[in-house]
Image (cartoon, helix red, strand yellow):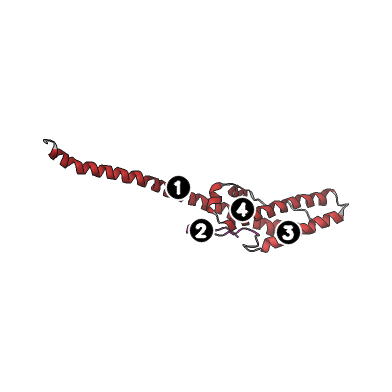
Amino acid sequence: MKYWPTIRKELPKTLLQILISAAVFLLAPAVNAEVSNRHDRGTYRSMIASIQSEAKANKAVLDTSFAEYFPSGVIIKEFSYSAANQCLSNPLFVKQAKQADIETLYVYVRDLSLSNRYRRVVGNLAVHNRASDACFETVKQQWGQMLGPMASKNRRGHGFPRVSCENQGNRRVEAC
């Protein structure tokens, strides 16, 4: 038992080192998860900001181009929905967003792409083939019925999206 004093002296230090190692081993995944969640929330907020910028630009296109030139049927500018489309295809965005926000964005993308298609059809009819005025007016009327409410729809009625970050406990951020 000549080693007993050394063992008594070193045993607490060794046990303490084992406990510290175990605590760090168990704590590391939690710290990594928190760092990853913060990064994901930051990325989500960036995605929301890109959708907001796109929605503001689309609102300007609606107010300046569509509203002004709709009666003639020849409209130069189209709506852009690439940021919203990319966000909807991103698993991180879908994981972070509320279901109502995702549905609103799907309707937003659908309405804008449909409006762009109407613009192309009406533009072609107006420029190339004014002989079929009845067809031109019918397509333009259907297009106008879709465009009119787009400018005034609220969040539940879809229009331009109002997507928020509130489900992460952050301040509410809305577009248009």
Whole-percent x, y for residue 131 in the image: 88, 52
Which mark, residue 93? none
Q: Secondary structure at mark 3?
A: helix
Q: Earlier in the sequence, mark 4 or mark 3?
A: 4
Q: Residue at x 57, y 47 (%)?
A: 90
Tag nearer the camera, 4 or 3: 3
Query: For the residues marked 1 and 4, what is the alpha-carbon distance in whole angstroms?
Result: 27 Å
In this view of the protein, which residue sits in the foreground, 167 or 131?
167
Q: Mark 3 highlights which residue?
A: 146
**Amino acid type, callout 3:** Met
Examine the residues drawn in magenta and state their main secondary structure.
loop
Q: Mark 1 highlights which residue?
A: 36
Q: Earlier in the sequence, mark 3 or mark 2?
A: 3
Q: Residue at x 60, y 54 (%)?
A: 102
Query: For the residues marked 1 and 2, what is the alpha-carbon distance in whole angstroms?
Result: 17 Å
Q: Secondary structure at mark 2?
A: helix
Q: Mark 4 highlights which residue?
A: 54
Tag nearer the camera, 1 or 4: 1
